[in-house]
Every structure is written in C-alpha cells, then in structure tokens.
Image (spheres, grey):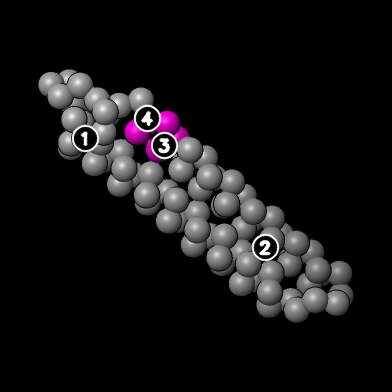
Amino acid sequence: MGNPGSLTRSALAFSLAAGVAFLGSAMLLKAGRTFPALAGGAPGAGQPGILLVTTVILLATTGVLLAGMAARDLLEQRRRSHAR
C-alpha cells in the first residue's frame, strides 16, 4: 500500500500548477491588450493577436485539466479513507 500523504501532495501540486496556468493566462491576455503591437495584433485596434489568444486558451485549458487531476486525486484519497 502506498503512502496516503502522497495523494494529498500530488493534489496540492496539481492545484498549484493549475493556479499558475490560470494566472499566466490572465497575465498574457492583459499584456496582449496593453501592448497589442508586441502580441501580434493591430496597433490601433487594441485587440491581441491570434497567436496570443491561442496561447491563452491553451494555458486556460491546461489549468482546467490540472484542476481536474487534482480533484480526481482528492476523490481517490477520500474513497481510500472510507474503504478502511
């Protein structure tokens, strides 16, 4: 039988990584709106470029995936503690 604390540490690590992904996504989107010329967008439009939007979507999707993995680990830990 494995260490029951390892699932908690794993869930915490996944949650932390999800938070970093969400924060990075938000910061990139804000920077793209502030400096659209650096992000590949039109200088006068104030809209970020498609590459930046794609990166933001990829980071947000990764954050959702990591949050789901953390939830799965916490549920697995809870099931194991109730099975004893």
The residue tagged with tag 3: helix, strand or loop?
helix
Residues drawn in magenta: 52-57
In the figure, is residue 17 to the left or right of 46?
A: right
Q: Which residue position holds label 2?
A: 74
Residue 66 picture location, percent across and down? 57, 52
Distance between mark 1 and mark 4 Cα atoms: 11 Å
Residue 56 on the magenta segment:
yes
Q: Is residue 33 visible?
A: no
**Residue annotated with mark 1:** 38
User: Tag 2 or tag 4, which sits nearer the N-term?
Assistant: 4
Residue identifier under label 3: 55
> Badge 4 is on which residue?
51
Q: Is residue 53 magenta?
A: yes
Q: Element type at marker 2?
A: helix
Q: Tags 1 and 4 in contact by the CB under 8 Å rule?
A: no
Q: Are marks 3 and 1 in contact (CB under 8 Å)?
A: no
